Amino acid sequence: MSTDLAWFKSSYSGNEGGECIEVAETPGVIHVRDSKDKSGPQLAFDPAAWKAFVDFAATAEA
């Protein structure tokens, strides 16, 4: 399934490796995985829950 998804990394991710996640959107589900373990486990979020997380993370960073 993960090979059929269009995965992308955050614009905050560097090219030197390290800790990073990748995200793929499908209708009704946001998929999240570890960029270093592409065949490993994935998390799936409802779009509203993902938006709430991203909004919270953005305010926590500020």
Image: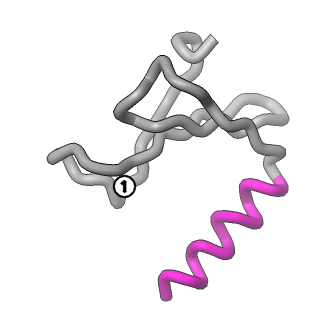
Q: Which colour scheme is used?
A: one colour
Image quadrant occupied by the N terminus: top right
Magenta stretch, main secondary structure class: helix
Q: Is mark 1 on a helix, strand or loop?
A: loop
Vertical order, 33 against 17 (above or below):
above
How far across and down, in percent of the image, does residue 20 sit? 38, 48
Who is closer to the viewer here, 51 or 19? 19
How far across and down, in percent of the image, does residue 61 sit? 49, 82
Residue 45, picture quadrant: top right
Residue 23, picture quadrant: top right
Report whether 42 appears left or right of 8.
Answer: right
Vertical order, 23 against 54 (above or below):
above
Report whether 2 appears left or right of 44.
Answer: left
* Residue 14 among those drawn in magenta: no
Specify the amino acid type for callout 1.
Ser
Residue drawn at 73 percent across, 54 percent down:
50
Residue drawn at 80 percent across, 30 percent down:
27
